[in-house]
Image (tube, rainbow, N blue to C red):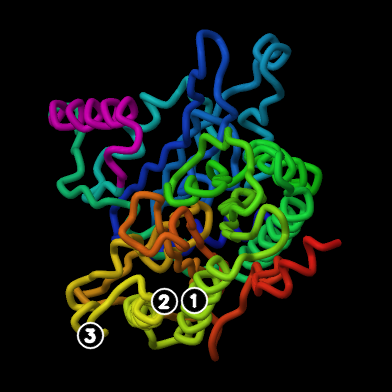
Amino acid sequence: MKISEFISRRTRLLSAMTSNSVAIIPAAKELTRSRDTEFAFRQDSDFFYLTGFLEPDAVLVLTPGKDVETTLFCRPKDKMAEIWCGRRFGVERAKEEFGFDQTLSLDELDDQLLQLVNGNDTLYYGQGTYTEFDDQVWQLLSDLRGGPKKGWQAPQTIIDVRSLVHEMRLFKSEAELEIMAKAGEISAQGHIRAMQFAKPGATEYQLEAEIHHHYAMNGARHPAYGTIVGGGDNANILHYTENSDVLCDGDLVLIDSGCELQGYAADITRTFPVNGKFSKSQAALYDLVLEAQLAALEMIKPGNTLKQAAEVTIKVLTQGLIDLGILSGDLTQLIEDEAYKAYYMHGLGHWLGLDVHDVGDYKQDEKDRPFAPGMVLTVEPGLYIANDSNAPEQYRGIGIRIEDDVVVTATGYTNLTLGVPKTIAEIEALMAK
């Protein structure tokens, strides 16, 4: 992504801030995995959205209307540290590469941050994400309040900067959509690879390895979240990630996985037979979930809401459960009583972007937010009939979810993950190869 994209975002945020204000946005820190090893570093999503800068411990400061509006504090060059832990941009190169008005060393943070915050009426800051940095900010404010004889003045108002940034992040630019489309394509091909590998006697973790290998070999080194590979009754555990069991002949396997590409997540779920052929009971439930997803997708257009799409999904699933003899009674009453929740207990979808469960309000003025062009969301109905459920025996131990990623357009939607098969005929044909 071009640096001009990040500069444009900072400019938009500066324009949204009040006069005589300052915003402080910290980067993520490295996290210890065990003793002297760290988890793979992943940048804070808000900080990355505004900077494109991938080093830990940095701090972005925005001061609208000032001679210097954008300041980055970052780690200075350090030859010995770079020998051990990798190269750093350093202060001078960070300014050149990322288009900030000024860059300063983290060694200067305390003194310079006090000067940047002093005298402003409003501080934009997101409390609670990094408690250690929270303490640093509260100490700064305390110092400013205690120094009136020095001419110091602390901001009187604190506003959560995330409310502004997250509204921006909800609507994806063309550059973002290009990356997300590529992430969807890589993820779809990973799912295809897992389908082709699957067979009785293989393990869940082997399918996980196949799909992760495809991600990495195509430039997406990490999955966007913990991959779920649930065979048989394991598919009825919504966030199953042990991925340790052997896949059995006659079972379905549910894979929920997506890659992260240049910070952006894909999120796909497909469910398919381990042996390549759906049984009659499996097919009946699968076609019901697919019917529900297709009905929901028809609702994805500007002006409609996620709640409306969810209501259509619930109606289709509940009627189908009645038709299959899994539920009994009046359709309207069963929906009112939420009887479907015994077998479909999660929502229809969520926003998608830099986070797999991405930011952005689902309601505005206490009303469900209508879809608008540029929003990206998942559509993922499912049915989960555990071995210990009250459903007829032929349906027990079957868990099904079908999930795609869609971007809202001016006239409807575009499916970013359509590349992986999802009809019974398509899946069986692929696995037969």
- Give the residue at mark 3: 330
**Mark 3 or 1, nearer chain start:** 1
Three-letter amino acid code of the residue under disc 1: Leu
Give the residue drawn at x 45%, y 65%: 382
Front of the two marks 2 and 1: 2
Give the residue drawn at x 47%, y 36%: 27
**Element at label 3:** loop
- Give the residue at mark 1: 288
Q: Residues within 10 Å of mark 2 (few under 14, many from 20)?
A: some
Give yes or no for residue 296 being in the magenta stretch: no
- Give the residue at mark 2: 324
**Mark 3 or 2, nearer chain start:** 2
**Mark 2 or 1, nearer chain start:** 1
Looking at the rendering, the stretch of residues picked out in magenta corresponds to 125-148
Would residue 82 appear left or right of 329 to someone viewing this image?
right
What is the CA distance from the residue labelled 3 to the residue labelled 1? Answer: 18 Å
**Element at label 2:** loop
Front of the two marks 3 and 2: 2
Residue contact at pointers 2 and 1, CB within 8 angstroms: yes
Three-letter amino acid code of the residue under disc 2: Leu
Residue 427 in the image: state x and y as whole percent.
71, 67
Would residue 173 appear left or right of 398 to someone viewing this image?
right
